[in-house]
Image (cartoon, grey):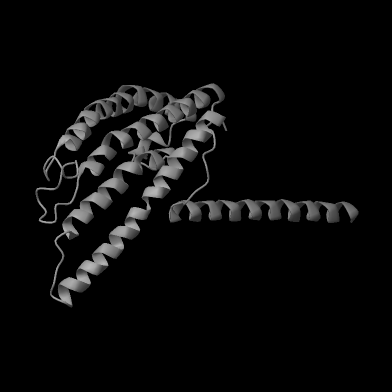
């Protein structure tokens, strides 16, 4: 695999797996919320805020990781039937026309969006800087979440460059380069197991046929 592509894939994987811990934080937070709400009758004021901040951070920062595994939702009913070179040509075109401009616009607008959020002084000139949630009596800060928006777009854009290199490789050689091994869908695992079983069966049949021919020759 191209070292440049491998580096970007590993970076996207590292970022995605770091932010995957947000799920654990979210799980503990909601478990605590359910306990204090229904057992102690004393609900928290920050449950809603922790839900959208943790899930929002996970959803955005896992985008590049998901792209590196070719795991984004795709209407591939027809796409998967095409030869690799045609697939690569379509991917190449869509990345240039949609992914790069979209992520570029998100970075451009997101930087201003985040900067404006950090410019607020909700606690006065001597208090901490940064926007707080207007929907929460707890005053949960939302500036970090808004900062993640252009950062996530940058990682997706960077991964898009790696995908573009993959497309060029496929256009030249007629096959897709391998990706890093990772978690697989159960369906893919089952399909691979069936294919391996069929391959072993074919090999066994060939061996049996060879043995039969050898025995027939000796007779």
Left or right side of 44 for 9: right
Q: In terms of image quadrants, where is residue 107?
A: top left
**Up-down: is 72 above or below 197?**
above
Which residue is nearer to you in this view: 32 or 88? 32
Taking the image as shown, residue 211 lies to the left or right of residue 72, namely: right
The residue that appears at 36% across and 49% down in the rendered structure is 19
Q: Position of residue 109 (x, y in %)?
A: 21, 28
Q: Position of residue 165 (x, y in %)?
A: 48, 26
Q: Quadrant of residue 93?
A: top left
Which residue is painted at 70% across and 55% down in the image? 204
Left or right of 164 on screen, residue 134: left
**Residue at the location (14% across, 52% down)?**
139
Q: Is residue 48 above or below residue 123?
A: below
**Count of marks overlaid on the render:** 0
Question: Residue 56: image x %, image y %?
Answer: 25, 47
In the rendered image, the quadrant that contains the C terminus is: bottom right
Q: Nearer the viewer, residue 160 or 201?
A: 160
Depth check, front residue: 158 or 88: 158
Residue 202: give x, y in percent of width and height: 65, 51
Residue at the spot x=39%, y=34% of the render? Answer: 79
In the displayed image of the protein, which residue is found farthest to the bottom?
Answer: 39
Q: For residue 34, which quarter of the picture?
A: bottom left
Instruction: Specify the quadrant that holds the N terminus.
Output: top right
Please identify the residue farthest to the right as the structure is shown. 218
């Amino acid at each position: 695999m191209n070292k440049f592509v491998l580096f970007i894939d590993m970076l996207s994987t590292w970022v995605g797996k770091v932010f995957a811990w947000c799920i654990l934080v979210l799980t503990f937070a909601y478990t605590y919320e359910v306990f204090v709400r229904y057992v102690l009758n004393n609900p928290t004021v920050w449950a809603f805020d922790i839900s959208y901040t943790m899930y929002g951070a996970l959803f955005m920062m896992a985008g590049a990781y998901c792209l590196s595994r070719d795991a984004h939702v795709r209407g591939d009913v027809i796409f998967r039937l095409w030869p690799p070179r045609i697939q690569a040509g379509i991917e190449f075109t869509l990345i240039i026309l949609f992914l790069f401009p979209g992520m570029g616009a998100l970075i451009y607008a997101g930087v201003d969006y985040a900067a404006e959020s950090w410019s607020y002084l909700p606690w006065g000139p001597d208090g901490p800087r940064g926007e707080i949630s207007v929907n929460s009596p707890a005053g949960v800060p939302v500036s970090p979440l808004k900062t993640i928006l252009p950062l996530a777009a940058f990682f997706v854009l960077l991964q898009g460059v790696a995908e573009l290199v993959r497309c060029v490789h496929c256009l030249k050689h007629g096959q897709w380069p391998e990706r890093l091994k990772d978690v697989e869908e159960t369906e893919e695992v089952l399909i691979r197991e069936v294919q391996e079983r069929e391959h072993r069966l074919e090999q066994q049949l060939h061996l049996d046929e060879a043995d039969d021919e050898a025995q027939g020759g000796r007779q």
